[in-house]
Amino acid sequence: MPNITLYLVRHGQSESNTLSLLSSYPEIPGSTVRHLTTKGVEQAKAAGEQLSKEAVTVIIASPLTRTVETAMLISGATGVPVFQDVRLRETDFGIYNARPSREFFQRYTKPEERIETDGADGVESTLGMRDRVESILQDIARELPGQKVVLVSHADTLEQIHGRILGESVYDSAIGWSPATGSVTKLEWEGV
């Protein structure tokens, strides 16, 4: 089977980033819908310019506003349509959604504390997220062999995709590489 080229794109800087607020799926109008900032728009345009030189074939984005806005700017530069997939969504922050990120990090001080959660606060475990990642990667491997695929998503989700492609454990992926806003990371993947 031909290799798949994956481009992992973290959304551009968003209002939630600058306000230090968490913003999960589903978005709550007036509460968690956060758009790209001016800087985020510029980051997304730069990612689009970079990807326009790569002959990408498909763009798949998380359905959150900031990722869709990023993906649409990339689409404008590449001429490639955007498909949304809920499996690329942000971590479900449960009761911490739309609240200051410091509250979440006071509860979960280390990434390993989120590998498995008891569900009492509604926070998605990293293991649960890894299952989502595995599911979409299986579909990409089956349906898009040999393609150049852009995945527009969020830091935690992209960490797990990156780790899965490199053969890292859930734990190692949670404490290792982390993408900056607006960044593009290219990976060659055998699709297995």
Image (cartoon, rainbow, N blue to C red):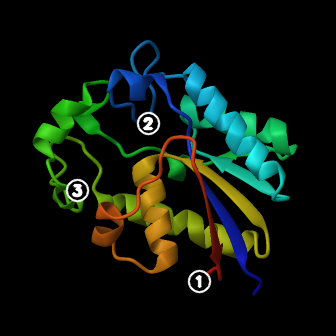
The residue under label 3 is 111
The residue under label 1 is 192
Density class for disc 1 (Cα within 10 Å; few <14, some 14-19, many ≥20) is few
Amino acid carrying mark 1 in the image: Val
Single out the mark in the foreground, 3 or 2.
Answer: 3
Whether residue 83 appears in this view of the structure is: yes
Image position, residue 26 (x, y; %): 45, 33
**Taking 148 as reference, is 165 above or below it?**
below
Density class for disc 3 (Cα within 10 Å; few <14, some 14-19, many ≥20) is some
Q: Observer-nearest residue: 166 or 39?
A: 39
- CA gap between label 3 and label 2 equals 20 Å
Whether residue 127 appears in this view of the structure is: no
Residue found at the very far top of the displayed protein: 30
Circle nearer the N terminus (3, 2) = 2
Single out the mark in the foreground, 1 or 2.
Answer: 1
Image position, residue 8 (x, y; %): 59, 56
Circle nearer the N terminus (3, 1) = 3
- CA gap between label 3 and label 1 equals 26 Å
Cβ atoms under marks 1 and 2 closer than 8 Å: no
Residue at the location (81% across, 59% down)? 54
The circle drawn on residue 25 is: 2
Amino acid carrying mark 3 in the image: Pro
Image position, residue 172 (x, y; %): 31, 71
**Residue 160 position by quadrant:** bottom left
Relative placement, left or right, of 92 versus 5 is: left
Relative placement, left or right, of 68 versus 113 is: right
**Residue 37 position by quadrant:** top right
Relative placement, left or right, of 19 versus 135 is: left
- CA gap between label 1 and label 2 equals 28 Å
Relative placement, left or right, of 177 versus 142 is: left
Single out the mark in the foreground, 3 or 1.
Answer: 3
